[in-house]
Each structure stands twice: as structure tokens, then as C-alpha cells.
Amino acid sequence: MSDANNQGRKLSLEDLRDPEVAAKLSPQAPLPPPKPQLLDYGLTDEAISYLQSVRSGADATATKVRWVSFVCVTLAITIMSGGLLFFVALIAGVIAAACASMICKTALGYPLEEYIFRSRLNTDWTEAEQRRLDYNLAKAKWATANSEFERILSRGAHIFWLSKTGTELENAVAEVFQDSGYDVEFTPHSYDQGIDLVLRKDQRTTVVQCKALGKPCGPNIVRDLFGAMHAFKANEAILVCPRGFTQATAEFANGKPIKLYSVDELAKEMYQFESYMPHWIANAHSLEDIKREINKRFRPSRRRRYS
């Protein structure tokens, strides 16, 4: 990674948002995603306000239609039964009100509120509404991408890693490798042989041990890790200790398939900023796509225990 890029990582988020600062960084430096603007979509605040007022009016009209459906059905059944089926009439009225939107969608292609809303717009405003929907989707993509950008950029701060407890460090390291395309599994704490994570990628297995120590990691830990690596039949091992390693530890790991990650390695090379807009955000076609991918990628169940 270039010096300019490393410098970019040390800048604050507000610095990165300054166009003058951003212009001086290398093309590979991490930059926040540009926020979509109303003018980019041919919209103004007044147009948005008008569309919102029309939609509010449509919602109010749809509510009145449901109440009318409820009252008409309830009165009709009550009168026809001579009042004997009043409670049945109430239930039927509720069902009629609830089904009004579904019936409208089946017959006219839109839910009740949407049909009333669109019927009140001329061609120009219908096109403006579509631009508003496109703007909302772009803004949702930006918010998700910006959150992803800030989450990843925070890893470049030394304090992010130095402040982690044992379990927090495991989770943070696992997240980094998951973002880098590894299949990550946590080992059960009752019998892990000192191994916290098992990584798999390109038919290679890597074992990881995380140590949130208050001092540099000594050689005994890396020796045990070397033995556990062979027990797991792994291709390589990674020892993570933000506080660093003693000289004896570095000497033992030298020439062996063992990587040592101190706070400097954690803050620099464990994530490459190929794009501020992950493909799953850029390819989303609706807000539901974004929500679905967020749930898929960040729900706790994605982290399986090694067995």
C-alpha cells in the first residue's frame, strides 16, 4: 500500500470529506461515497414537499374508503339480519375494510393508497415521483455504503484494536477476514487447543489465535500455536496480538508458516479499499434488497462454530 494511502487511513472522516484534502490523496486512498443530491435527479425541495402532500392526501382518502367499506358492510348485514347478526356484521365490516387495498391491487394493479396517489398526478408529476423513488433508493445505497465505509475505516485507528477485549478482538478479526472472502468458523471454547478461528479460502486452511494482552506476546504462545496448527492440519497460522511480540516470538515464527499481526499490521493491510461501494449495495434494486443483504451478512448466525 502506498504512503499516500497510509496517510489517507490516518485522516479523520471529516478530513476525508474535505474536497481539497481528498484531491491531494492518491487514487487508491479510501474516500467516502458521494451523497446523492436532489438536483442530480431533477428534483427540488418544493417538488418533494408537493409529492409528500399528495401522498398524505391519498393516504387520508384511502382511510376514508376503508371506513366507508366498514360502515356499509356492517350496516347492510345488520339491517338484513334484523340486528341478530350484529357481531358477525362487525367482523365482516373489518374484513371488508382490510381487503379494500387487496381488491384494488387485484383489479387495478396498485394498492388502494398508491392508486389514489397516482390518479391525482399528471404525466410530469408521475415522472417526478419515479425520480423521487430513484433518489430514495440512491440515498439508501449511500447510507449503507457510508456506514460500511466508516465501519471499515475505523479499523485503521490503533485505538480500535488496542481497546478490544478477548472476545471483541476475536469478533473484529473474524469480521475482517469475512470481508476479505474467507469462510470463518469459531472454535468451541471448551476444546479449542488455543485456536480461536479457522479460516478457509482457495482450499487452504488457516488457524488464528487472538491475544488481547496488555504486553507483547511471549514465545510460549507461538510455540503452542505451531503445534495446534499441525493438530488441525492447517496450511498456516496467524497470531494476533495488538500489543506486539517479543523478539523471541518473532525469532521462533521466522521461517515458519506463521504470521504475526500487531496493531500496525491490523491497522494497515487486513482490508483493501478496492471500492467504497460493495457489489451487493451497488446491485440492489430496491430498499428490500439492501435490508435482505444486511440481515444476511450481519446476523449472528453466519458465524458457525467449528466442529
Image: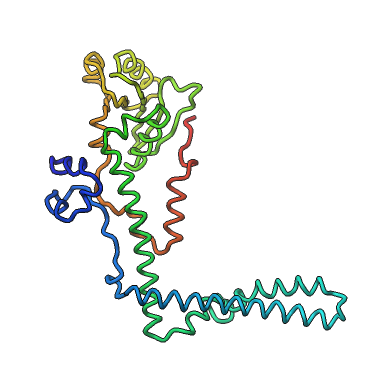
Q: Which residue occupies 30% across, 72% down? A: 41
Is residue 256 placed above or below 44 in the rendered structure?
A: above
- Of residues 148 and 234, the one nearer the viewer is 148
Viewer-side residue, 199 vs 241: 241
Q: In this view, does 96 lie to the left or right of 285?
A: right
Q: Where is residue 237 in the image (x, y as percent from the top left)?
A: 32, 25
Q: How is the image coloured?
A: rainbow
* Residue drawn at x 32%, y 74% as measured from the top left: 44
Q: Residue at x 31, y 29 (%)?
A: 162
Residue 226 falls in which quadrant of the image? top left
Look at the picture and state if 30 lies above or below 221.
below
State which quadrant residue 227 falls in. Answer: top left
266 lies left or right of 299 = left
Question: How far across and down, in percent of the image, does residue 117 sit?
Answer: 49, 79
Residue positioned most to the bottom: 122
Is 23 displayed left or right of 135 in the figure? left
Q: In which quarter of the image is the N terminus?
A: top left
Quadrant of the rendered image containing residue 192: top left
The residue under the point 39% across, 75% down is 130
